[in-house]
Amino acid sequence: MSYYLLNRTVLFDSLTGKIVFTGNKKSKQLRSNEWKLLQLFVSREGQDITSDEILQSIWQNKRARSSVTTSIKNLRAQLEDGAHQPRYIQTQVMTGYVFIASVKPLTKSEFDQAIRANDTITSTLKRNLKKHRKVCTLCIINVISLATIIFSIRLLYISGAFEFFSTTSESHSIVPMVIQTEQNELSNQSIYNICNALAIDAQQISKLLFLPITQENPRPNSPSLTWANESKEMLICHMPSTKPSP
């Protein structure tokens, strides 16, 4: 057999020396010594292999024993394995090494199918999210911040916080108004114009609704506006007397 599934997580093509991680679809090309070493381990799954056997099988005893240690270390790195908590290659004290991963032989079609099975939209999305996780995290934070700002502004708008600053170009008719005078010498038209100007001014600076409720027998020193009652359905324009006091 030339194709294997190791530990259900790594696909190994012994003809090309290529390994593919099924989880993230990451592939690696093994170097010559690592490739031969993995072939040896797969062929003797679960068996103790001494350093001398490895040296003889791969280098025909033409290398130093340190080459075995170096190649084992490099192969572990390619398989993303560790010496302290091994999932593939375990060191046997005073003996050598043993390949502890499960080995499942595959046909060419099974191997190709396993490669394609991981190439889905979901796995592609996961790989892209992992690759650009910093950018994605920043975008999520920005979206949450923007949503919070919009929600806060909406609450302020509903509560009427912007009514004082709002300006409108729409023409609103002035509510009915009663004019109260005290022996005013001005003509009726002048009095009307003054009261109407007061009402328009109050409306334009958005203070019309904030005018006070009238009190009994007010004595203003200058023209003023008040509401006739709490329902705010009618205005009262108070005009002080223009005659000098006797």
Image (cartoon, helix red, strand yellow):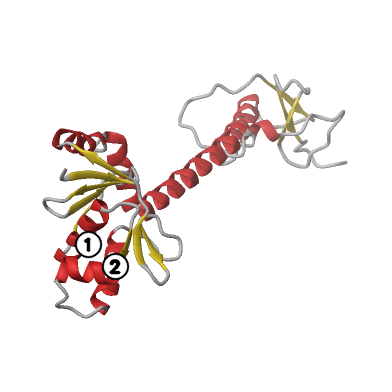
> In the visual, does 140 lie left or right of 196?
left
Numbered circle sitting on residue 187: none
Foreground of the two, 230 or 110? 110
Foreground of the two, 82 or 217? 82
Q: In the image, residue 135 lies at what x, y percent? A: 36, 53
Q: Residue at x 21, y 63 (%)?
A: 34
> In the visual, does 167 lie left or right of 246?
left
Q: Is residue 214 among the parts visible in the rendering?
A: yes
Q: Residue at x 22, y 62 (%)?
A: 37
Q: In the image, residue 102 lies at what x, y percent? A: 34, 46
- Provide the secondary structure element on which disc 1 rests: helix
Report the amino acid beneath label 1. Answer: Leu
Q: Which residue is the site of mark 2?
A: 72
Tell me if label 2 and label 1 are in contact, CB under 8 Å: yes
Q: Is residue 163 among the parts visible in the rendering?
A: no
Question: Quadrant of the rendered structure where residue 35 is?
Answer: bottom left
Numbered circle sitting on residue 37: 1
Foreground of the two, 84 or 152? 84
> In the visual, does 230 lie left or right of 84?
right
Foreground of the two, 1 or 26? 1
> Which quadrant of the rendered structure holds the C terminus?
top right
Question: Quadrant of the rendered structure where residue 174 is?
Answer: top right
